Image (spheres, coloured by chain):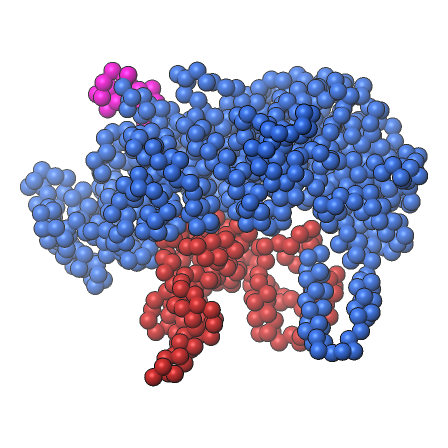
Chain colours: A red, B blue
Amino acid sequence: MRGEVRSTVERLDRPSAYYLSRVRASQSIPNKRRRDRDDNADEAAEPAVDPLANATTLYVGNLSFYTTEEQVYELFSKCGEIKRLIMGLDRFNKTPCGFCFVEYYTHQDALDCMKYIGGTKLDERIIRTDLDPGFEEGRQYGRGKSGGQVRDEYREDFDEGRGGVGRALQSEKSRYDD
Amino acid sequence: MADYDRRQQGHHNRKRRYRDDDDHYDRRQQRRRIDSVPVPVRLRRQLLSIADSPLRRWSEEVQSIARMVADNYDDENLRSTFVSLAMQLVIEQPLKTPFVAAVVLVANTLKPEIVDAVLTPVAQDTETKIAKGEWRDVKLYLKFLACLQACLEGDGIFPLLEELFSRAADLQTASSEDTIGTEIVKIILLTIPYIMAAAPGQFQQKAADLMDKTDIIASEPHALQALVDPYHPDPTSESASVSLSLCMLLQKQLQAEASKNWELTCIPRPWNMPLEEIEAQDKLANAPKHALPTISIPSTVIAGPRPLFPEVYFSVYADQEVESVPSTDSVASSLIRDGLTDTINGLHFNRNATARYLIDLDCYFADDTFVKRATPFDELRNAAPGKSTWKPEDVAVDIVFAQLFQLPSPEHKLVYYHSVLTEACKLAPAAIAPSLGRAIRYLYNNSPRMDLQLSFRFLDWFSHHLSNFGFTWKWAEWSDDCSLSDLHPAKWFLRGALDKEVRLSFAQRIQKTLPEPYQPLIGPEKEKDVPDFKFSNPDTPFSSEGQEIGALLKRKAPDEEFQPIIDKIQAEAGERALDPVVASTDVFMTAICWVGSKSLSHVLACIDRSKERLLKAANSSPAAQTQVLAAVMAYWHAHPGIALSIVEKLLNYSILTPSSVVRWALTDVSLVDGASAGEALAQPHIFELVLNTVTKVSFRVRQLLTSPDADEETRNGETKAMQDLFGLLNDLLVSWAGGNKDELMEMGDGSSEPEALIRRWGQRWLRVFKRLGAIEEAFVVETAKEKAGSSNGVDAV
């Protein structure tokens, strides 16, 4: 990635802004430096060793809670054989909560997946893929207060595939009803 | 560029929001900020978006960029931005090549040094690409140089093309199977039209001489062409149409074009200025000429990283009453196709940009090449005589399908081409969807005479595509085909496509999208997420043992607790004159499937825990190994996708061998679901199973052959195993294809319809696996040659 010539159009096989912001935050690089960085300036602010340089794992988001492993397999196998699939689970109920990790055997398959599958539909939802440095035990569980993903806590829209409106809002509502 | 724009815009938005209520907001300041965008950035933006606008202000755009480069020529940053970006555009977005060339040509009238600054690195890089055998890049640079022919000294790039031809001729004389020579001839033929459009009226004789020479190579069908023909008509039928290779077509098309004084109507000529700019045109005509730096060609040229095959012309709009895509008589069919194909394959890293090109295709060709966008097909008939009837959407979609259906395989994974069509459909549904509809109908109707691997690609694409658009399709038009025999190819397609739809979704959802006649194709068994456990039925032999083993697996009992029950099954089986290990294996594997039926993770974990026992059973006899597979396929028979995923893992564990899978698929399937012999050949998932298995084996061998770490013994062993596998496939399929398989002969004298259909399936299977075998064999031979070459120190590179 670094040292490579910038393409004439944006590449889809790059880590997301979310991932980059987390990396930068963890390295506490001042905000100012980032904003001032010119297009042609050297990217010294990037981490010295890129944890994604050989990444074979993808984080997959915006799945329906009802999407099964088999469905994920069927779609993601189109980019190469899947080595391992870990479904994201609600920390308390141990039920799917709308994300998963897909691990391929090769880095190239993971990049191809970013290019060809990220942003397409699975189970009639647009799914999101992001390169991931690798699965670690514990990451399969939602980090939200109620056990699911954080984004499902305060979501205001009604999303049938992801348990309606946000959990926190739901519990608030029921409090008013009582 | 995109990132710069975005940042600017984001910045701007932030400011706007901040100042929305501010009455003293000074708009002038904003304008100043935009003007102060550094020149190299502005240049990048303008050059990248050249010709994108449907307003088609080509001469303005070209002159403005040329002026920007000339005015700031002292700025080294700008100079290098221009040169490197021009070269990058030519490679990544080759439909823009004539426009980039036009910028250079105009710049030549302002600051002639610019031309040399471009020519030097282009020539150098062309030389490098030739040496590496990266023929597409060579072609793209030559196209660029051809567009610059008017500012080159002497004969311009003709001497280079002549030298390339002499290499091609040598290679072709040496071997009829040579593909590099054919590729070079194709490149030469694709370069000539751009020379003739860029420097009209000057090089007719040169072109004619060169085409006389290419004629010998380009007029003969290539030895490998039959192998990669998308059509595989039934030899008994009359409709044996002859497919043509791109090279043969080009030769004919160029000859026709030469006789029309090289009209080349589709090529854009942004170097021709509008009438009111006579002065600029004059300057262009009298601009200085430049010498093309030497580009040396090694005496031995190589095939490069991608294996080369002859390209066969394929169109899904071939048989229409009105020509919605250029006919193969017209050079436009090859030129438009070549340009867009390279764009599609070059922009694999951004399918949205690729899709944009499909929609905006008409922007990059001469006026009146196409009809207006989104013109309904029925209106093409009303076109005035002599006017184009080419629908840009049809042309674009046709080119993607030609890639998707390219044999042996296109440059990128098939799913890339799926995603391009999906995005194009999202960008302009009203324009693209009707074109796709006609393509689908063509493919559906012609699938029986197509190569079986391509029919499978069609089925796979179709189901995936529908999954992105709510599974809507006008199924009613094929309703009658639901009642066809399962041996019929149309039924094969319907069953396979619907199964894949269910895999990506679920049975009840897909049932809702289908008219009544289709309902039997998604039976109640497909609705069940957890298939019945046959040992729950007390009438099933070994039912109590089956349940016991199931219970042990569920509570993850230690291995020794299984043995007594296994022993019991085997003893009982012996008494009933059954194969004891086959009987116990069936119980064990079926129980694993049932216990693991909750999800793939569950079954894989269960297999992992039982690995040793499964390995021992599978290695005890071929029949037992087959039973492992048969049990999986039987338990998941209503959900073949899950069965295939499990088999994949069993192959990884070496519990199953590839040959056991092949043997089971082609001889024993009937044992599972009561299908009569030969019917397995007409089941899409059985073809998928064998294709996946063979692909896995070939991939592994290729890895071993190219990895420096693999030891010789493993390499040879695995290669031999692969060759044996292809041998086995051939042996098993030849008799089905020839109609002399015992089971087939028992059915009758070979004249009944089912017999004929099964024979045809045999032929289609045989063709696919013969080809795959031949391709892998060629790979083995090539790597051996390379290795011998490099160990002798005569590395070709």
Q: Quadrant of the N terminus of chain B?
A: bottom right
Q: Quadrant of residue B625?
A: top left
The residue shown at (42%, 40%) is: B474
Q: Quadrant of residue A152?
A: bottom left
Residue range in magenta is B732-751
Q: Quadrant of the C terminus of chain B?
A: top right
Q: Is residue B181 visible?
A: no
Q: Nearer the viewer, residue A41 or A118?
A: A118
Q: Nearer the viewer, residue B267 or B744?
A: B267
The residue shown at (74%, 40%) is: B97
- Left or right, residue B662 beside residue B715: left
Total tally of numbered discs in the picture: 0
Q: Is residue B501 visible?
A: yes
Q: Nearer the viewer, residue A2 or B142?
A: B142
The residue shown at (43%, 77%) is: A169
Q: Nearer the viewer, residue A167 or B218?
A: A167
Residue B302 in the image: state x and y as whole percent.
Answer: 64, 32
Q: Residue B201: say if magenta.
A: no
B287, above or below B529, in the image: above
- Left or right, residue A162 beside residue A54: left
Residue A75 in the image: state x and y as whole percent.
Answer: 43, 50
Give the dominant element type of the magenta stretch: helix, strand or loop.
Answer: helix
